[in-house]
Image (cartoon, helix red, strand yellow):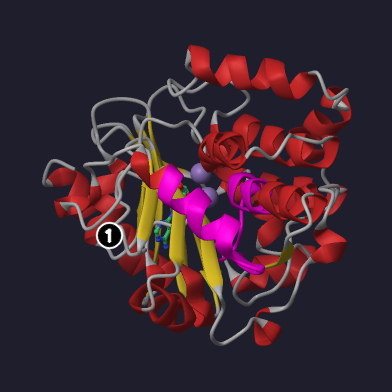
């Protein structure tokens, strides 16, 4: 955990959780925000604290930057009917809390509000990205935590807020998605201990798993077929990549949010250590990178203005698919 301004964003102390709990206890209203294009941990950790705040008599609102949409596989999450569009986010919140967000840049139009809150000493950052630059006034950043959901669980304990079923469903979603269904090497005994605690709330585990990881529209399967058909494997570089164009999204009538799991198919290639999916979007080429060996894709993504973890990272870049792909190959040739 980190309390204040550590160099390079690592050194963290657990007193940050106590500082965060004090700020929250003293506030009448919380304003929560998670990173742009929220994934299971961003939505799950934020909605969990939202549920707990409301259940404990604390006013709370939850939001994320435009595009204000949710990937279809997260639509079952309780609390999505209780969110606030970013245009209605308070410009000067009493206490602002960010979730799973390693830098202000990932907050889009909510970024300037976060910076204002930080200057006022009222920005709490709850995260687990090693690349987090500790942009909060209180930084609860634990790179050893498998998910931001783990950090939120600790904060709830500090606050004396008991878990409830809605919060447990949300925390479980963060935990199961960020550990790749308890498969990645961040799956520690602490992860199983939290999963055990959450499972006591009678969670619909198999329904959630199917929603999160299995079920897709038939149109998505057709898009996958097309993208796997064009995938390129560079045997020497041990690198596999494919891409989705704006024309693909149109032709198959699939949204970019729906394709979050495409990288999990591409990364199955036995011949590759690094895998990549590039997607054309209005903001530029969205890149997902995954690694199974030595290469630190978080470092590569950071160099291109993004971030993430050693084995899973991403960035958004201007240019064409071919140009961005060439830049990534260049970084890999140079040694990652
Ligand atoms: P994704 O490939 O989108 O599933 O993202 C994998 C990891 O990289 C997640 O931990 C994200 O939070 C992080 N990440 C993805 N895109 C970016 C970005 N543009 N900037 C910073 N981190 C990112
Ligand atoms: Mn995330
Ligand atoms: Mn996360």
Q: Quadrant of residue 317?
A: bottom left
223 vs 303, left or right, is right
Asked if residue 242 can be seen in this view, the reply is: no
Magenta-span inclusion, residue 22: yes
Badge 1 is on which residue?
326
240 vs 159, left or right, is left
Cβ of mark 1 under 8 A from ligand 1: no
Question: Picture coordinates of residue 89 (x, y %)?
Answer: 65, 81
Question: Picture coordinates of residue 61 (x, y %)?
Answer: 71, 68
Residue sitting nearer the eye, 59 or 238: 59
- For the point 25% across and 38% down, the residue is 296
Question: Picture coordinates of residue 159 (x, y %)?
Answer: 60, 42
Q: Quadrant of residue 10?
A: top left
Question: Picture coordinates of residue 49 (x, y %)?
Answer: 67, 50
Q: Which quarter of the rendered picture does the C terminus lie within? A: top left
- Most extreme residue toward the front is 26
**Which region of the structure is painted magenta?**
18-46
Q: Quadrant of residue 318?
A: bottom left
221 shown above or below 191: below
- For the point 21% across and 42% down, the residue is 11
Residue sitting nearer the eye, 229 or 330: 330
- For the point 30% across and 58% down, the residue is 134
Q: Residues within 10 Å of mark 1 (few under 14, many from 20)?
A: few
- For the point 55% across and 21% down, the residue is 191
Magenta-span inclusion, residue 170: no
Callout 1: SS: helix
Asked if residue 270 can be seen in this view, the reply is: yes
Q: Which quarter of the rendered picture does the N terminus lie within? A: top left
């Amino acid at each position: 955990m980190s309390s204040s301004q550590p160099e390079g964003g690592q050194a963290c102390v657990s007193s940050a959780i106590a500082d965060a709990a004090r700020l929250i206890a003293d506030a009448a209203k919380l304003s929560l925000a998670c990173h742009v294009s929220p994934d299971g941990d961003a939505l799950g950790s934020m909605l969990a604290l939202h549920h707990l705040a409301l259940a404990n008599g604390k006013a709370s609102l939850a939001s994320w930057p435009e595009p204000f949409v949710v990937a279809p596989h997260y639509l079952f999450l309780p609390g999505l009917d209780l969110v606030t569009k970013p245009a209605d986010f308070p410009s000067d919140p009493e206490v602002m809390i960010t979730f799973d967000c390693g830098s202000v840049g990932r907050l889009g139009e909510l970024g300037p509000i976060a910076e204002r809150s930080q200057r006022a000493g009222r920005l709490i950052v709850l995260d687990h990205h090693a690349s987090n630059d500790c942009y909060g006034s209180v930084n609860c950043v634990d790179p050893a935590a498998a998910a931001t959901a783990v950090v939120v669980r600790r904060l709830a304990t500090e606050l004396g807020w008991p878990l409830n079923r809605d919060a447990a469903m949300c925390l479980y979603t963060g935990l199961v998605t960020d550990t790749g269904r308890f498969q990645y090497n961040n799956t520690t005994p602490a992860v199983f201990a939290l999963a055990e605690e959450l499972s006591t709330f009678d969670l619909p585990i198999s329904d959630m798993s199917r929603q999160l990881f299995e079920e897709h529209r038939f149109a998505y399967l057709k898009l996958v077929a097309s993208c796997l058909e064009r995938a390129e494997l560079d045997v020497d570089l041990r690198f596999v990549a494919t891409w989705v164009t704006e024309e693909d999204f149109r032709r198959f009538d699939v949204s970019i949010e729906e394709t979050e799991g495409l990288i999990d198919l591409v990364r199955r290639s036995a011949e590759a250590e690094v895998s990549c999916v590039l997607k054309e979007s209005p903001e530029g080429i969205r890149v997902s990178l995954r690694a199974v060996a030595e290469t630190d894709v978080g470092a590569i993504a950071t160099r291109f203005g993004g971030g993430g973890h050693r084995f899973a990272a991403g960035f958004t870049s201007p240019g064409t698919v071919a140009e961005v792909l060439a830049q990534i190959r260049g970084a890999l040739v140079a040694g990652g």
